[in-house]
Image (spheres, rainbow, N blue to C red):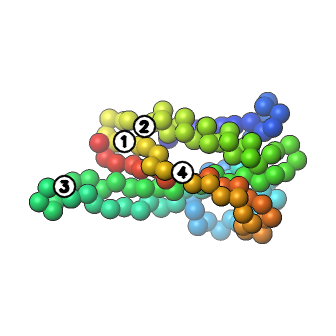
């Protein structure tokens, strides 16, 4: 997958984006308030299952990775605007890498939530369930 970039509310200043694996030692509060990131993108280990189309013999093993974009309101950054900008960027990045010589990559579904999480009053999250399958 390519690089994901965006800007904060002014449309000029680059957003500070960190991409990490889910389950690391960092807390959202630390990432947003101490290290001052504008966006946190987490990638989970995949859910995998075998597709058995003919005579119960596994043919493909598609992986579904949850990629979560997390934003908060802070000076110069409106969470809902940043979440929308990141939604556009993630979709474009996945579409650009959708078909390789040996794989298929697609967004299976998306979900959205706005809630209190990780010691932060309001967190905006968009989950992308990205399916990866050998071609």
Q: Which mark is residue 53?
A: 3
Residue 80 position in % (x across, y down): 74, 47
Residue 30 seen anywhere in this rendered image of the structure: no
Image quarter of the C terminus: top left
Picture quadrant of residue 100: top left
Which residue is labeled 4 in the image? Answer: 110
> Which secondary structure, mark 1?
strand
Mark 1 or 3, closer to the camera:
3
Contact flag, marks 3 and 4 (Cβ < 8 Å): no
Which residue is labeled 1 in the image? Answer: 104
Residue at 83% from the left image edge and 33% from the top image edge: 10
Give neighbour class at mark 2: few <14, some 14-19, many 20+ (Cα, 10 Å): some
Give the farthest residue toward the left. 55
Mark 4 or 2, closer to the camera:
4
Q: Which mark is residue 98?
A: 2
Residue 7 position in % (x across, y down): 74, 36
């Amino acid at each position: 997958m390519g690089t994901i970039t965006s800007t904060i509310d002014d449309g000029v200043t680059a957003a500070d984006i960190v991409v990490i694996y889910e389950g690391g030692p960092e807390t959202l509060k630390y990432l947003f308030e101490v290290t001052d990131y504008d966006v946190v993108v987490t990638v989970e280990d995949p859910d995998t299952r075998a597709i058995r189309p003919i005579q119960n013999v596994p043919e493909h093993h598609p992986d579904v990775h949850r990629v979560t974009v997390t934003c908060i309101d802070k000076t110069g950054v409106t969470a809902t605007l940043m979440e929308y900008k990141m939604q556009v960027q993630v979709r474009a990045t996945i579409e650009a890498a959708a078909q390789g010589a040996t794989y298929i990559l697609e967004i299976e579904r998306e979900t959205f939530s706005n809630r209190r999480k990780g010691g932060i009053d309001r967190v905006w999250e968009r989950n992308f369930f990205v399916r990866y399958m050998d071609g």
